[in-house]
Amino acid sequence: QVMKGYYNKPEATAEVVSEDGWFATGDIGELDADGFLSITDRKKDIIVTAGGKNIAPQPIENLLKTHPLVEQVVLIGDRRRYCSLIVVPAFEALKKWAEDHGIDPGSEGALVEHPEVVAGVGDELLAMLGDLASFERPKKVALLGEELTVENGLMTPTLKVKRRQLEQRFAALIDSLYEDEAADKTAR
């Protein structure tokens, strides 16, 4: 047993300790062939689409982080019809990519908003996800001009993304990824 509960906080204890004494960490894991447990995701990070499909973002994000143009990436799409990506690019690699594609890199801010850059980077990243189920594959990509850090309140001290804060701070950008969704609702 990890703990009996929180001192003088029965409501908080009831939220995390089951009646039979199990402590709910909120982690999702899997056992490998040798019986070792690996933590693969956080339960509260699971995305549930408007169609009721559950998506674990971390394996998708971890795959995309292997791309040389990606510094940080967040899969979003909770209660939406499809998923999208918010990408903090590796700016030196992005500048070189832009130059290689005949695009003046200019400032980092201008680069992340350049339509050809966003489309090109998006195409490269989405091509990596061809093996995913269709509901797991992001449909749109946005590039951010600032890193997600503890100091700007977008990461925890253990360097996990604060998804809700990110979605609040960049609500206008995220809403722009789903403009067609809003148009579909008003057309009905």
Image: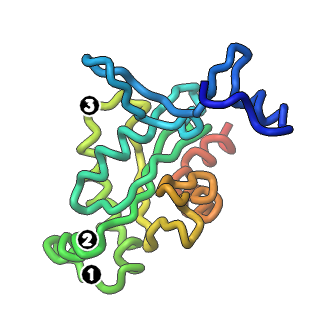
Q: Closer to the camera: disc 1 or disc 2? A: 2
Q: Residue furthest top?
A: 20
**Disc number for residue 105:** 1
For image coordinates 65% across by 59% down, the residue present is: 168
Residue that mark 3 sits on: 131
Choose between 48 and 106: the one closer to the eye: 48
Q: Position of residue 154 (x, y in %)?
A: 55, 62
Callout 1 environment at 10 Å: few (<14), some (14 to 19), or many (20+)?
A: many
Up/down of 61 relative to 116, above or below: above
> Whole-Å distance between the Cαs marked 3 and 1?
32 Å
For image coordinates 26% across by 62% down, the residue present is: 69
Q: Amino acid at mark 1?
A: Pro
User: Which comes sooner in the sequence, label 3 or label 2?
Assistant: 2
Residue that mark 2 sits on: 94
Q: Position of residue 104 (x, y in %)?
A: 24, 82
Number of marks: 3
Helix, strand or loop at mark 2: helix
Circles 1 and 2 in contact, beta carbons < 8 Å = yes
Q: Amino acid at mark 3?
A: Asp
Up/down of 120 relative to 101, above or below: above
For image coordinates 29% across by 68% down, the residue present is: 90
Is 166 left or right of 128, judged from the image as shown? right
> Whole-Å distance between the Cαs marked 3 and 2?
25 Å
Quarter of the figure with the N terminus: top right
User: Which comes sooner in the sequence, label 1 or label 2?
Assistant: 2
Is 79 left or right of 93, judged from the image as shown? right
Quarter of the figure with the C terminus: top right
For image coordinates 39% across by 24% down, the residue present is: 30
Q: In the picture, residue 17 is in which quadrant? A: top right
